[in-house]
Amino acid sequence: MAGQGKQITTSWKQKLGRGLQAWRFGTVLAVFLLVMAGIGWRLIDLQVVDNDFLRKQGDVRTIRVDPIDAHRGVIMDRYGEPLAVSTPVKTLWVNPSEANPEDPRWARLAALLDLSEGKLRERLERYAGREFIYLRRKVQPSVASAVLDLGVAGVYDRQEYRRYYPAGEVTSHVVGFTNIDEQGQEGIELAYDRWLSGEPGRKRVLKDNRGRVIKDLMLIRDAKPGKDLQLSIDLRLQYLAYRELKAVVDAHKARGGTLVMLDADSGEVLAMVNQGSFNPNDRSQLSSQHLRNKAITDLFEPGSTMKPLTVAAALESGGYQPDTKVDTSPGYRRFGRFTIRDARNYGQLALSDIIVKSSNVGVSKIANDLGGDALRAFYARLGLGQGTGIGFPGEAVGVLPARPSWQPVEEATLSYGYGLSVNALQLAQAYMVLANGGIRYPVSLVRQEQKPQGQRVLSEQVSLAVRNMLRDAVAKGTGGRAQPALYAAGGKTGTVHLVGASGYEKDQYKAIFAGMAPMDDPRIVTVVAVDAPQAGEYYGGEVAAPVFARVMSDALRLLNVKPRLEMTGAGQPGADSRERG
């Protein structure tokens, strides 16, 4: 019986073992099938249900939209010589999350980019959680290549453009400059910023996990380059004017100077320069006081250069002729405590002699006869006291006083250029009217394809009569040193006290000359003004007139203007040339 019981127990255990084995197999199989089913469902979910969502998430991590920089338009002179161009350069940047601040190669990289190694490593640690910081913007491609060849982890480059000015400081006040993002800040770059600026493009690119572009996928919008701009400036004349103005400022230890040259028949600006100046390609020593285009932004009293305009007003009134006599005896006039003087007692002077001898007494008597309102209205017709229409940022319109009741002394001082203010461009525009037969054109820094519509403000007869007086003022009057070689010129000197914080500065003057040439058919009008010359001479006839002579002589030769000298004293100052206007 005991043996039989033992046999039954063994049989039961075997059956139980087989049952457990079957259960385990079934459990494993069920788990396996469930896992497979889960994987299969997940595959279906990923490939079918959530496919669009996951694809977008993948694209977000690998596909980027990169900007395409637009090429800024070229600024050029009237003959196509470049004055401002955008050149391709490289911008270097770093992904701090990929960079190792302890990498010894950072020392060499910092040296190549002229950066402080310590500050660079500090920035990397401070912005370790970021994916982008600039290392150096707009460096030369050769420098960028040298940096990338170091193989520093996390350092990348991208192409941008940098503005370059081939003529440097010679054209800086006209052209101006842009900031690092190529946005106009001064001059033509600012005035025509929208015209010159292009529209950036966009493209979709594939990048790796380090932010490097693997492949361009699609162009979203192509970049549109900015439009080119052709100025009226003649770069040859601009260089010439800059050289001569700088030479006279240096020679006389002057505070600064301005020169403007206009085409007499169109109002186009052929040259416009100032001293001091600046180099837009190197702004490390940039001074705010040198940024102004003083020919347009700075005002001054024009002094005796207004006398021809006063005489023109007298002739235009019909009450005077060129040979009309004015009694200037005894050489001075008193208005209360104020006295107007001439260099000496000239006695009876014709209108032409008033210009030649620069008589304050004579021109003031004419002004009192005409009246302040008539004189002011005539000046306004020539463009004084109003914008020139040039559209340059910061243009000053000047001061042309209007009185409810004019005092005789106010009329007198107005006639010889005190009590009003102009900029050099306005003065040149007024003389342009005398040069071209009485037509006032809007002045322009942009080349005109067609001659602009002008406005007659003076008769041809009067303008011719005043030009003859200006010729005599150079041939035998105060402007003797303004006579250019081989060409007959005409013009008027001016010397005025500079205005300081406390009024007129006793020993500081502005030397001015305004004129035109050649006198048989004036082609160019030029105004020269030199601020506070110190080296002994300070009169307009001594400082500004010689600059006019040199500039006009070379400019007319460069423009292929044929010399037609009248040999009766042209270039030979007479006895009256020692008088100072």
Image (tube, rainbow, N blue to C red):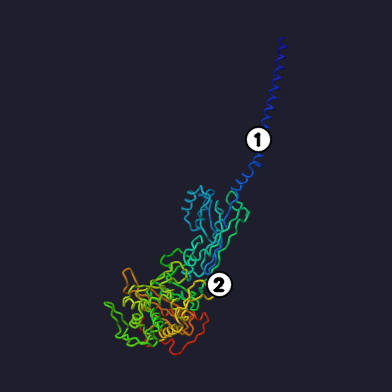
The answer to which image quadrant residue 400 occupies is: bottom left
For badge 1, the amino acid type reads: Gly
Residue at which label 2 appears: 80
Whether residue 335 is situated above or below residue 38 in the rendered picture: below
Task: Give the residue displayed 58% in from the left and 60% down from the top.
Answer: 223
Task: Give the residue displayed 65% in from the left and 39% down from the top.
Answer: 45
For badge 2, the amino acid type reads: Gly
Report x, y in % for residue 363: 35, 82
How far apart, in angstroms, are the residues tagged by discs 2 and 1?
74 Å
Task: Give the residue displayed 26% in from the left and 77% down from the top.
Answer: 337
Q: Nearer the viewer, residue 115 or 289?
A: 289
Residue extending farthest to the top is: 1
Whether residue 259 is situated above or below residue 121 in the rendered picture: below
**Quarter the N terminus occupies:** top right
Give neighbour class at mark 1: few <14, some 14-19, many 20+ (Cα, 10 Å): few
Q: Is residue 183 left or right of residue 207?
A: left
